Every structure is written in C-alpha cells, then in structure tokens.
Amino acid sequence: MNAFRPILEGTPWSRWVVLALITLFLFREGYQFFGENYKNITVYRQAGLEYVDVMRRQESDHTALTRYLSDLRLRTLTQLTAEQKLTLPRLTSSCRIRRFFGQV
C-alpha cells in the first residue's frame, strides 16, 4: 500500500492520468482476449471437439450408472448369502436371482 501512496496523495490530475492508463490497458487486453477466444472457439467447433465432449459426457454417465448397478448387484448378493444363509448354487438356481443378474 505504501507504494501507491504517492499516486493516491498526488494531484487530482495525476489520479485521472493513472485511471485513464489503467482503463486503456484493460480495454486493450480485453480486446485481444475476445479476438483470440473467438478464434479458439471457432477451431474447437470446426474440429468436432464439441461433439466429442458431448459423447464423452454421455460415456462417463453410462460408466457411472454401470458402476452403481454393479455395486447394487454385489450388495444384493452379499445380503442373500450372508444374512439369509443361502449358498451360491441355491441362489443361481432361483429364476428370480438369475433374472436380476441378467442371465435369463
């Protein structure tokens, strides 16, 4: 803060000059940014990367759903074998459990 004290305590004219220079540099940088950003977005879309992002999002959603269903199946199997004292041969012979695990 001490470095800016001479500028802030200077004459009103010097404050206006500093403010004008800051504004000028901000507008110049902003103008360059928007031009470059427009070019990058155009290349991004022409290369088909926007479509790839949509497909990648769908694939990750599908993967998450698959993991959830696999975890649900494992918990169900654990419950049936541990809590109800059922053996795996007895479980696999049950039509209901085969249908649940997608084997029928």
Image (cartoon, rainbow, N blue to C red):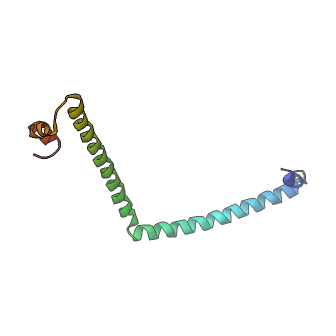
Location of the C terminus by quadrant is: top left
Q: Quadrant of residue 55?
A: bottom left
Residue 9, compared with residue 74, is above or below; it is below
Q: Nearer the viewer, residue 66 or 48?
A: 66
Q: Nearer the viewer, residue 93 or 38?
A: 93
* Left or right position of 84 against 42: left
**Residue lying furthest top:** 84
Residue 38, compared with residue 96, is above or below; it is below
Residue 17, compared with residue 89, is above or below; it is below
* Left or right position of 62 against 29: left
Who's the residue at 36% across and 63% down the image?
A: 52
- x and y percentages locating residue 31 in the rendered image: 62, 65
- x and y percentages locating residue 37 in the rendered image: 54, 65
* Left or right position of 103 against 26: left
Q: Quadrant of residue 11?
A: bottom right
Q: Quadrant of residue 20?
A: bottom right
- x and y percentages locating residue 21 in the rendered image: 77, 62
Q: Nearer the viewer, residue 53 or 68?
A: 68
* Left or right position of 104 against 20: left
Q: Nearer the viewer, residue 6 or 14?
A: 6
Who's the residue at 66% across and 65% down the image?
A: 29
Image mark count: 0
Who's the residue at 19% across and 30% down the image?
A: 85
- x and y percentages locating residue 15 in the rendered image: 84, 55
